Image: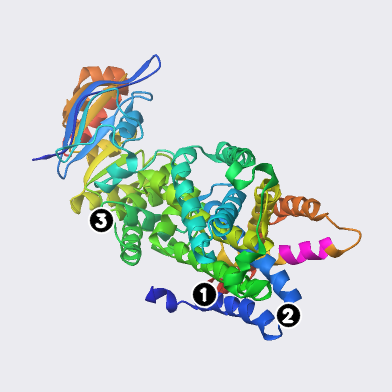
Amino acid sequence: MPLMLRRPFFWVITAVVAVFAFLPALGDNVQLRESLALATIYITLASNLNLMLGYAGYINFGSIVFFGLGGYICIWLTDAHHASLILGLLAAGLGVSALAFVFGFGILRLRGPFFALSTIGIVEGVQAFVQNFEPWGGSAGIYVSPEVFAPLGGPARALWVIYFALVGTMGLSLYLSYGIKISKFGLGLLAIGQNEDAAAILGVPTPRYKAYVYSASAFLPAVAGGLYFFKSAFIQPADAFDLSLSTEALVVAMLGGQGTVTGVALGAYLYEELRGYLLVSETFSHFQLVVAGMLLLLIVLFFPSGLMGFVYSRFPRIKKVLE
Amino acid sequence: MTAVLELSHVGKRFGGLQAVHNLSFGVGEGEIVGLIGPNGAGKSTLFNLINGVYAPDGGKIAFRGEDITGEKPFLIARRGLARTHQIVQPMMDMTVVQNCMVGACFGRENLPLMRARDAAYEAVGLVGLDDRADMLALHLTIAGKKRLELARALAARPTLLLLDEVLAGLNPTEIEHMIGVIRRIRDRGVTILIIEHLMQAIMSLSDRIVVLNYGEKLAEGLPAAVAQNPQVIEAYLGDPKLAEALHGNGGGA
């Protein structure tokens, strides 16, 4: 897309990706790497969720299902079938995307609260299935043998490889969000989000577009899930399909400003930092969901268009650089 | 004159209500056909049948010779049939131009984004919203939103345009402006089927009038002839004096 290269925001994304990649690598700073690794996951989840929430106007409580299923597929392939990590990640992304496409045509007939509820149903359904699926270890999950890290040059080096892959996944998520936003597809999605019936009457192929975007929003979270659980070398249903992470992704997207690329990424980063602070502080340890809930409440009440909405209203010109 | 739109024996029932019954008529290329009738006569339902929001229970709807009965709205839009809504349906958080770009991108010409922008600005200019092109739709007045409805439909460069009460709720100056716009649209070769309650306006705009009552066709013909039809006067106009006045004006239209 040569057109994209001429847009300033493309280079903003590229710069952010470069900072993420080089900052911990320069000083061989493992602590910073781990903190930023979590941030890349939050940004990936929130950005892809934003495709549904901010563009097409559909609230997906079940985005975590993509992450968890991606993790399972990747771990199962690399551990039990000795596939390479790349193959495992590709299979995770493509498999989960294809599944989302098929499901999408079904559940995207529902609107508003009914769609939102059905996405929770999907999380519960998939979790129940995996808990009883013996090849994936049932409710005990899968422990990965350390041998899987050998092709990546041992565990220590593997952690760096995985980190760079996570940064790449985050980068692709941001480019995807931006690419869709400035495309005809994005205009159609925006129209659906604003007024679905009117959009259809103007010629937007609504069922197809919704299934496309649902499927597109599944790919990179599945890859991120594959990387995350491969890195932990362990996966179990309760972690893989944790609804609270879905909810956090929603909070983050709304905090930053749904529908914007910058806002959602910034929201995700800030939230992750806050969460990290709360987790290590003595008084607030494991308090982050309470904070998330309160944040959501405050945002909905006072800043319905999020951080970026507030910035745009104060500095309209910034819209041209930070989309 | 070839028929752009041809309805034959179209019917639609909602539970116990026969909203449209055994309705047949055609719209020729380049014509402005007025659709009138009392409230609840089935006019808007008919629009919803034509552009695929509802599937008819029976009968056939053909657009430019092709059967479109029961087709999805977005496919019908792609064929070159655009409409406006009686209750305006703007995409509130999008600008006027963005709203129109949706029409241009996904309508008959299926334009790429950049060319859609040009088509959108052209449509915005045609309805006289140039000065508000980059304003969010939610900030428009009701008259502005009505014009936006029209611009968005026009941006698709349709063959046939269905106008559902675009004059309702406008003041006399705005009505005059809108009538001018509709005439200009017709001069560009767009065929128009229009629902309107303002008798003076529709009688002077239309080449032909179709009158609906209780979902059935009560009369069809030239505006002057329809205005004289005793059944129409009784069912719709009610007041014979009004009919006389219209007859006087309608003769020249």
The label number, if any, that marks residue A9 in the structure image: 1
Real-space Cα separation, disc 1 to disc 2, in angstroms:
28 Å
Label 2 secondary element: loop
Q: Quadrant of residue B234?
A: top left
Q: Quadrant of the N terminus of chain B?
A: top left
x and y percentages locating residue B19 in the rendered image: 34, 21
Residue type, numbered disc 1: Phe
The front one of B20 and B168 is B20
**Residue at numbered disc 3:** B109
Q: Is residue A10 left or right of residue B56?
A: right
Q: Residue at x 69, y 61 (%)?
A: A232
Same-subunit check for callouts 1 and 2:
yes
x and y percentages locating residue B182 in the rendered image: 27, 48
Residue type, numbered disc 2: Asn
**Is A132 placed above or below A30 here?**
above
Pick out the residue farthest to the left: B1
Same-subunit check for callouts 2 and 3:
no
Real-space Cα separation, disc 2 to disc 3, in angstroms:
55 Å
Q: Chain of mark 3?
A: B
**Residue at numbered disc 2:** A29
Any magenta on residue A145? no
Real-space Cα separation, disc 1 to disc 3, in angstroms:
30 Å
Same-subunit check for callouts 1 and 3:
no
Q: Residue B142: tell me if it is visible.
A: no
The front one of A198 and B177 is A198
Q: Are marks 1 and 3 in contact (CB under 8 Å)?
A: no
Start-end of magenta stretch = A271-279
The front one of B213 and B49 is B49
Which color scheme is applied? rainbow
Q: Residue at x 38, y 60 (%)?
A: A184
